[in-house]
Image (spheres, rainbow, N blue to C red):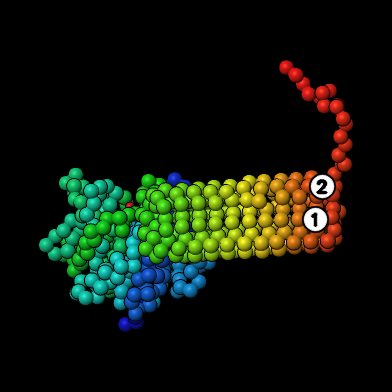
Amino acid sequence: MSDIINTVILAAGKGTRLNIDKAKPLCPAMGQTLVDFVIQGIEGFSEKISETIEYNFVVGHEKEKVLRHITENYKNLSLSFAHQKEQLGTGHALQTFFESNPKAWGNEYTLVVCADTPLITSDVYLKLFDEIKDSNFDAVCACFITGNPTGYGRIEQKSIGFNIVEEKDATDQQKEITAVNSALYFFKTSHIKNYINQISNKNNSNELYLTDLFKEGFNVKTVSFSEEKLFLGVNNLVQLEEAESVLLQRKMESLMLSGVIIKNAKSQYIETQVDIKPKVVIYPNVSLKGKTTIASGAILEEGVIINNSEVGAGVKVRAYSYLEGAKISDDAVIGPMARLREGTIIEKNCKVGNFVEIKKAVLHEGSKVSHLSYVGDAQVGENTNIGCGFITCNYDGANKHKTIIGKNSFIGSDCQMIAPVTIGDEAYVGSGSTINKDVPDHAFAIARQRQVNKENMASRFIKKK
Ligand code: UD1
Ligand code: CA
């Protein structure tokens, strides 16, 4: 016998009850998808055992998309896909796997899990695996007691073995049973081989039920888990929200235990892939999404939203700032109410103040844009100061053009740069200038009308009521 465990992840279903435009395995959850959490739970299990796991997916609905998502994101795993053309039931899905992987009959154990149970942890897999290895049972089924068994298969215990009765087939009396099937199983592969072709679809769903591998008289066992939440099956958007709140709570707990200071944890939204180092402080109502990283000592004030961005050590992101696809280096200060868009790079010790929008631009070390400005398609040199109300006029209606500003320069308030334009090092641009010609290093540029004062003329213009 090999030391490979067949892991079969049932992921062919459409997820009709979700009412979204995606195959169920790809249903978005906390910045990832349902199937990601199942795979990551199994990866965690794999790290705790000496056997090798093969990840086999039974795919059907939107199979190309499901396949692409998994192959792109889990290049390091041993993956295979079996195509279930028609979804004739969970038992048929398992048949489909073995038909396309006959070699798998040679592996002693088979783990079966559904793609819609994202909360199962590595410890659950481990406990179930220990149960089948250490006992003489042919199959073990994880089950739990629930206050609301509706929709789950009921476990009807018998003196030898047990039956799993699906909701649609249950009598009123069976519906009262609160012990239910989690749809997570470990089998001796030989048990599947002996019985998989005896499953029939003579039930109220006309489906081939995988649960028929457990029957009165079979040498099978239930393993009870007390934490119902571990097995939540996501069939609709209410259950998705429940699952997401568990994932969120787990994320918050692990962050806080690692040394991240979180104020009013209940108000936060932090997706699972966000990486936050110890000594970060997060004030209420912050949203952190996608592949965001926050380095040690950063402070995120109230209402900050950050998506797919890197925030350096000691950075202060002040209240209600919105960052997307931005990279902020150490000790910079952003906001309040700044908007950093895709392609923004802010180097060390820069300052971006209130009501500043930056897009596809680099602020080199120590430069400042402190108030009410738009910096797009631009480079700003080291220690350059940009005054209030600055605008890069980067778009001519058809194309985007670049503004390049050198180091140690000073740009007065209310200036516009009509791109493409270059300002040199140690240059000075007077306030209120509209610049459309390059300014050389060390030059002073001013582009506005000279002021004229007319004595005693104000009375002609001041209106009285
Ligand atoms: C299933 C169990 C039920 C258990 C519940 C726990 C069966 C018959 N019932 O019911 O006892 O309490 O899970 O959550 O197994 N799938 C396929 N091909 C198919 C049919 C389904 O790949 O032909 C996949 C689905 O994509 C899904 C999984 O199998 O990931 C489970 O199917 P689903 O329809 O959600 O089963 P439940 O009704 O929830
Ligand atoms: Ca389900």
Among numbered discs 2 and 1, the one appearing first in the sequence? 1
Q: Residue furthest left?
A: 159
> Mark 1: which amino acid?
Tyr
Q: Residue furthest bottom?
A: 1
Q: Which mark is residue 434?
A: 2
Specify whether tag 2 is near ligand 1 (CB below 8 Å).
no
Q: Residue 369 location in percent, x, y?
A: 68, 53
* Residue 383 located left or right of residue 273: right
> On the image, numbered disc 1 is attached to which residue?
428
* Residue 212 located left or right of residue 460: left
Using the rendered view, name the quadrant where residue 144 is placed: bottom left
Going 34% across and 67% down the picture, which residue do you hit? 122
Q: Secondary structure at mark 1?
A: strand
Q: Is residue 212 visible?
A: no
How many residues crowd mark 1 within 10 Å: few (<14), some (14–19), many (20+)? many
Camera-side residue: 157 or 69?
69
Q: Secondary structure at mark 2?
A: strand
Going 45% across and 70% down the picture, which residue do you hit? 80
Q: Are marks 2 and 1 in contact (CB under 8 Å)?
A: no
Using the rendered view, name the quadrant where residue 218 is placed: bottom left
Going 68% across and 63% down the picture, which residue do you hit? 364
Q: Which mark is residue 125?
A: none
Choose mark 2 or mark 1, whichever is in front: 1
* Residue 36 located left or right of residue 311: left
Camera-side residue: 452 or 217?
452
Quarter placement of the C terminus: top right
> Mark 2: which amino acid?
Thr
Q: Residue 403 location in percent, x, y?
A: 77, 56
Q: Residue furthest front?
A: 455
Kindly report the distance in space between the C-alpha atoms of the residues bearing marks 2 and 1.
13 Å
